[in-house]
Structures are given as C-alpha cells and as structure tokens.
Amino acid sequence: MAPIDLGWNIDDSWCLFLDRDGVINERLFGAYVLSKQDFNFKDGVLEISAELFSRFSHVFVVTNQQCIGKGIISSKAVDELHKWMIDAFRKNDANIDAVYVAPELNNERSIRRKPLPTMGLEAKKHYPDIDFSKSIMVGDTDSDIEFGQKLGMKTVLVLSEEQCSSFPDIKVSALEELNSLLK
C-alpha cells in the first residue's frame, strides 16, 4: 500500500499504544492465550516491529486479561508470558517500554479495564513525557478505540471477526498496513 498523508505529523516524540490479542498475536475467540504455545504472533508483526516502533519515543501494550480474574492463570504467569513476548520483539530490534494489564472480570466494576483510561494514565505517571495528543492507540475492539479516544489519542482499528461500532481515525488490516501508511 502506498503511503498516504494522515496529517498526523508523527515524529519521535509520539507514543504508540497497542492492544495485545488481535493486534500483536492471534486472538483466540472463546478462549484465552495462556502459554507460549497459545501465543501466535500475527503474520508480519515481528518483521515490521523494528521499523514501526523506531518511529516512536515509547511503545506500550495495554491489555485486558480477565483470565486472571477468573483464576484460569496467575498474574505471575501472564507477566512471564509478557517477558517472553518482549524478548521476542527485542530479538527483532524492537523495544516495548511497558505492558499494562487489567486483570478484572468484564462484569466487575473495574477501574483498570479498557475502555477506561486508567492504564494510559498509569503509563503517563511512569513516563511523564507522554503527550496523549501525540499518541496512537491500535486495537481490534470498541473498548480499545474508546480507550484511545478518552485520552485524546489518534485511533487505529485492526479489522477482525468482531464487529465494531466505534469510529476510529483509520482502519487497517494489520500492523503491517499501519507501518506502510506511516512511511
């Protein structure tokens, strides 16, 4: 795909926020990613990550993981899976600054789960140079897009099997397409 001018004027002061399941790895509809064996990187993600991530001052993953709240997997096991994921990116010369996880159940009165902005505000506390107006949220669900919009980010919807009713700034088929658009 030929690059187009999104008018975003992205430079290395911008930040990239990524959902995990459905953006970085294949989402398991009706199931959870509980191990490295379940974690299948989406086609092309590792290959384009160095180029894509190098455009940004920081790269974060923000992910709802209610499998923790259900007692299916421990927080420690999810942290270990994320360390493994971060290492896979590092082996491809791509850096993820931090992973923020909301472990609560979808039906609980959570203060962390997307679409609430808590994980983004937590990132801002740890990385005060974040400017949400110069940040992009990439996700595959309405809650991802709403999270980004609540914080004033540009939003990118990765198209998936899930029907979305939100209105992102742009829609792409995968991170590869976003990378091409930003060239």
Image (spheres, grey):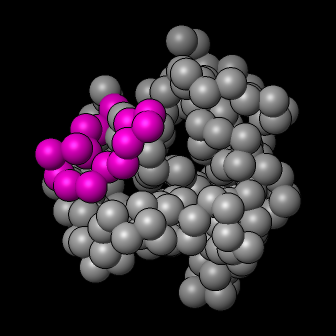
As drawn, the residue found furthest toward the top would be 1
Q: Secondary structure of the magenta portion, mostly?
A: loop
Q: Nearer the viewer, residue 54 or 148?
A: 148
Residue at x 71%, y 49% (from the top left corner): 143
Horizontal placement of 29 versus 112: left or right? left
Q: Which residues are magenta?
A: 28-42
Q: Nearer the viewer, residue 149 or 89?
A: 149
Residue at x 60%, y 77% (from the top left corner): 123
Q: What is the count of numbered marks?
A: 0
Q: Quadrant of residue 25 in the image?
A: top left
- Asked whether residue 41 is drawn in magenta, I would say yes
> Can you say which quadrant of the picture contains the C terminus?
top right
Question: Residue 182: x, y in percent?
Answer: 59, 33
Question: Residue 63: x, y in percent?
Answer: 52, 59
Question: Residue 29: x, y in percent?
Answer: 44, 34
Residue at x 75%, y 68% (from the top left corner): 117
Horizontal placement of 135 versus 180: left or right? right
Q: Nearer the viewer, residue 14 or 124?
A: 124
Question: Residue 118: x, y in percent?
Answer: 70, 75
Q: Is residue 88 visible?
A: yes
Q: Quadrant of residue 164 in the image?
A: top right
Q: Is residue 120 visible?
A: no
- Asked whether residue 183 is drawn in magenta, I would say no
> Can you say which quadrant of the picture contains the N terminus?
top right
